Amino acid sequence: MTDSSQSTEITDLFIIGGGINGCGIARDAAGRGLSVTLAEKNDLASATSSASTKLFHGGLRYLEYFEFRLVQEALIEREVLLRAMPHISWPMRFVLPFHKDMRFDNTTPTSKLLTTFMPWMKGRRPAWLIRLGLFMYDTLGKRGILPGTTTVDLTRDEAGKPLQSKFKKAFEYSDCWVEDARLVVLNARDAESRGTEILTRTEVINATRHADHWEIRLRDLATGEEETRRAKMLVNAGGPWVADVLRQKLGQNSRENVRLVRGSHIVVPKLYDHGRCYFFQGQDGRIIFAIPYEEDFTLIGTTDADHPDPETKPVCTEEEQDYLVRFASNYFERPVKREQIVWTYSGVRPLYDDGASSASAATREYVLTLDTAQAPLLNVFGGKITTYRKLAEAALEKINEVFPELPEKWTAGVALPGGDFPVEGVTELGAKLAQDYPFLTPYAVRRLIRAYGTEAWDVLGDATTPSDLGEDFGATITARELDWTIQNEWVRSGEDYLWRRTKLGLRLDADARGAVNRYIEARITG
């Protein structure tokens, strides 16, 4: 292990954490003229930010906890984000089946209020209450693109066919899908294009605080080399590790903490043919989604369970798999079975610890704390993927206290890489790609547009035949695309590409996945 000399340069911001919050703050700050370095000990989006339910949504169930500000901010933000990334995010319709005999948990604030004034309603969530919540959902969000709520006759609509016959009625509303891990990478790429230095596989060993700057000790996990960087301000966006970074890496005493909540998901072969999602309500007060996924699959999740510590790798336990299978089977006519599961994933959400009695009730609000006792330190607690851009703007308001007279907010309406086309322009863009590269299969066209948008042409380059794209690894993966992601998206392993930049690991067997990994490793080391 070598120890490089200490850098004499000093950057404005040093950000710890390459999840959505860290990369979102880096992009916003760099766009306002600050010099920024970001370090991530693993791959970008390697923890919470690649393990979400993949939704830009207001959080319908948070209305029951009276989190109106958070819901409104998220609802408004959906369409801002859609316009900036129409390749990786798109509108979806959600079907919420209802039956008059359904019973629910009665511990939410709304349930308690209902029971107080209408005691005969204990344990019930009547149709008028759901419709009232959806009316608020429609009106709080200032919709321009997304259609509002409608009532669905499940005896006539195709959405009723996969469901048990007892469900005759449903409500249908709008939210949005997002490719979460690609969202992180695109924010990092945009930040880099504006001058940010992105260091992946780089661990912060410790940071020493001085009166006017931080000294940050780093270790390159690929080479073992260590170096020291300096920055005027440090941003702790460690996600699940935010409290550990604060106390162990930075040596700061703080009463602020996070509540780690594990959310697990299962993926099964496609359960139904239409393109809408289902919102299922459970007797325990939880909800789950069943969502069309990667064209040939259905995604079911999520759970809410307290998680012990950030170093314990989150996995979808057998109990959680059974819970999700049982939950979904209470709605689908054909029961979901454990043996159908083809993949599971689990992530830890670092919620701000507000002392809530249950994981489901813990606040999804983000909290930013600025410590200016010496060199300034900004800590980021909590947050949700839908409001990442607003969180970054709030962080810049704090940073502006240290760097006065920063330019105004700028990210709303500014496209992420590949997203510079209209929300309704996906089909037209795909048709142009198919015309320019007639050897592509229809699936390859759809996949490349959804992954890269207008940058699909950069990925494919001057190819005129399939052989021009190099080795074919199956599932439309080619050597040329892998090379492009290695060069432009910090891909360093098969896992980076197959499970974060894409989800094509679902379509390859173990041998093919191994071939992808060997190719990437050879390109990195060669």
Image (cartoon, rainbow, N blue to C red):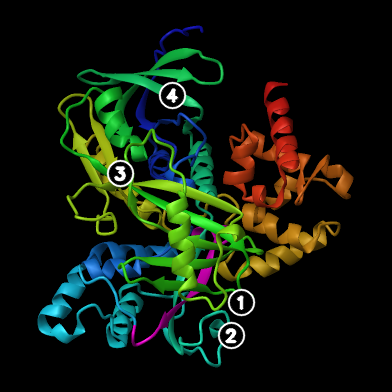
Residue drawn at x 30%, y 65% is 71
User: Residue 339's x, y, as percent?
Assistant: 60, 58
Residue 6 vs 135, above or below: the answer is above
Element class at badge 4 = strand
- Three-letter code, disc 3: Leu
Q: Nearer the viewer, residue 509 or 224?
A: 509
Dot placed on the residue nearer the N-terminal end, 3 or 1: 1
Residue matched to label 3: 396
Residue, disc 4: 203
Tag 2 residue: 158
Place residue 374 in its image quadrant: top left
Q: Is residue 72 visible?
A: no
Upstream in sequence: badge 1 or badge 2: 2
- Write down the residue under mark 1: 274
Q: Identify the element where label 3 is drawn.
A: helix
Residue 480 is inside the magenta segment: no
Q: Position of residue 41 (x, y in %)?
A: 46, 29
Q: CA distance from mark 4 to mark 3?
A: 24 Å
Residue range corresponding to the magenta coloring: 84-101
Q: How crowded is the residue under tag 4: few (<14 C-alpha within 10 Å), some, or many (20+)?
A: some
**Which numbered disc flags the more N-terminal residue, 4 or 2?**
2
Of tags 3 and 1, which is closer to the observer? 1
Look at the image and say whether residue 89 sits in the magenta stretch: yes
Q: Is residue 145 above or below residue 396?
A: below
- The residue type indicated by label 1 comes to His
Percent coordinates x, y for residue 517 in the rendering: 69, 34
Residues tagged 3 and 1 counted as in contact (Cβ below 8 A): no
Q: CA distance from mark 4 to mark 1?
A: 45 Å
